[in-house]
Amino acid sequence: MKWTVAFAACLAFVSAQNTTLPDSSQNTTSPTETTAAAAKTTASPPTAQASKEATVNSYNVTAPGTNHTCILVEAAMQIKVVYATKDGQVKEATLPLDNETIVDRARSSCSSPLGEQTLVLLFGNNSLSLVFAKNGTVYLHKVFVDVFFNTELFPGAVKPEEHLTVYNDTLMLYSVPEDRSYHCKVDQPVYVGANVTVDVLSVQLQAFRNTTAEAAGQFGAAVECLAGDISNIVPIAVGSALAALVIIVLIAYLIGRSKSRQKGYQSV
């Protein structure tokens, strides 16, 4: 009789386990699937994500009090910033210039004391300035980037509230005759400095436009880009800056460990 009761109790226990397991399995599977989906999104290369978000937009600069458009740009661009994290890693943030990017009319200009023309773009709290010069040909001469860090775009950054301003004023890119436009659909990274790169995914631009030669809103005859338009110096400069950042992070990590050990010795 005792054996029968014990056997019945075992059957009841097994039955209860069989009834409970499917629910437990379902509860366990659901979060796992969600986490896997999130992992796929996180693991996607920054360039691939930004390529979808960096839309082709049209920008122009018009001389005050006139209908003369001196700068005309149609481009898809994104800003890449390499930064250090609190846990000693080096990451890259991508800031796309999406369809909410606007022209800063107050700072954009068709003329300056140096004879330059400037296009200033605002995206979020950040800005990108393109300065064009003319010396026989028209070319991109200077690039300024102004970036404000935040926890969304720069997760885990050592300085989450950092304000980064960098520029390169020694460029001679996209050089064309004065009455022509520059056109390129090849991804061209433009190194600015301090681990910042402007990634030009596609572009057609023209500065110092002549109203008698071009109708409003139309480009002059295009000069197509060549493979050598962006110098090999660009990847070398980016690599050097990245190596320097890695060294800085490593030194900071070693100093932190040294201080931690000293505190440990003092407590002993």
Image: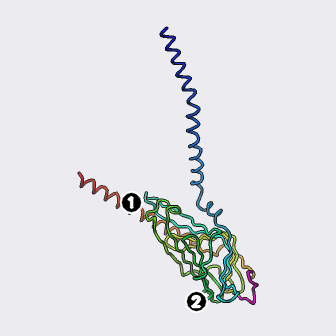
* Left or right of 184, for residue 193: left
**Which residue is label 1 attached to?**
253
Is 213 magenta? The answer is yes
Q: Mark 1 packing: few (<14 Cα in 10 Å), some, or many (20+)?
A: some
Vertically, is 256 above or below 17? below
Residue 112's disc is: 2
Front-lying residue, 88 or 135: 88
Based on the displayed image, in which of its 4 quarters is residue 185 positioned? bottom right
Give how far across and how far down residue 116 sits, in percent. Answer: 60, 87
For label 2, the SS is loop
- Residue flagged by tag 2: what amino acid is it? Ser
Disc with the residue nearer the chain's start (1 vs 2): 2
Q: Residue furthest bottom?
A: 113
Is 212 magenta? The answer is yes
Give how far across and how far down residue 198 sits, in percent. Answer: 58, 71
Front-lying residue, 19 or 233: 19
Vertically, is 266 above or below 13? below
Q: Residue furthest top?
A: 1
Q: What is the CA distance from the residue labelled 1 to the residue labelled 2? A: 46 Å
Residue ID at (52%, 61%): 152
Query: Is the stretch drawn in magenta largely helix, strand or loop?
Result: loop
Q: Bounds of the magenta span? A: 210-218
Vertically, is 38 above or below 102? above
Give how far across and how far down residue 140 sits, in percent. Answer: 61, 81
Front-lying residue, 112 or 103: 103
